[in-house]
Amino acid sequence: WWVAQFAYLLRELRARPEGDGTMLDHSVVLLCSEVSDGNTHSHQDMPFVLAGRGGGCVTPGRVLERRGVRHGQLLAAIGRAMGAAVNGWGDAGDGVLQGLLT
């Protein structure tokens, strides 16, 4: 159900013109769970789905595997893509996730 709602949101954003593209071109949308393993409540190696181009700051259509990297670096990269001067995110990561931003 959550993935269907995510797909619906992406279709709606892509259908709305904005500037030189669509709302999806100027957005970053994150789909994730609160844990990577429901049995152990682990936060290690959590899967994330990111959609949108963040105004051209994010290159779509790729799979990045970053084992052992906490999700704070992903959140910092999303902040950077959206124009915030973020260098880290709490104690869950130091710096910006490498390879995500153009």
Image (spheres, rainbow, N blue to C red):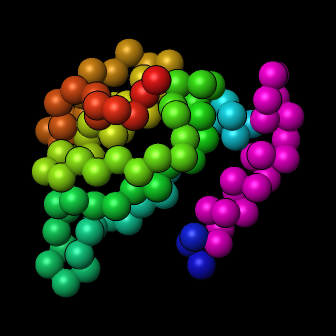
Residue ID at (58%, 30%): 54
Q: Can you see residue 36?
A: yes
Image quarter hosting the N terminus: bottom right
Report whether 41 appears left or right of 31: left
Q: Is residue 35 above or below residue 12?
A: below
The residue at the point 67 percent across, 30 percent down is 26
The foreground one among 34 and 71 is 71
Of residue 77 and residue 67, the one placed in the foreground of this image is 67
Residue 9 drawn in magenta = yes
Residue 48 horizontal/vertical position (percent): 39, 56
Name the residue furthest top. Answer: 85
Find residue 24 and report its image quarter.
top right
Q: Is the residue 48 above or below the residue 3 in the image?
A: above
- Rendered image quadrant of residue 43: bottom left
Nearer to the camera, 51 or 86? 51
Label total for image:
0
40, above or below 80, in the image: below
In the image, is residue 18 above or below residue 35?
Answer: above
Is 19 included in the stretch rendered in magenta? Answer: yes
Task: Say which residue appears at 28% left-offset and 51% top-offset.
Answer: 65
Decide if residue 20 is on the left or right side of residue 30: right
Q: Position of residue 94 (x, y in %)?
A: 17, 30
Q: Residue at x 46, y 23 (%)?
A: 102
Residue 29 visible to an observer of this rendering:
no
Q: In the drawing, does residue 29 fall left or right of residue 44?
A: right
Residue 63 lies, in percent from the top left, at: 41, 51
Q: Residue furthest front?
A: 62
* Residue 98 coordinates in the image, percent (x, y): 29, 31
Range covered by the magenta-colored residues? 4-22
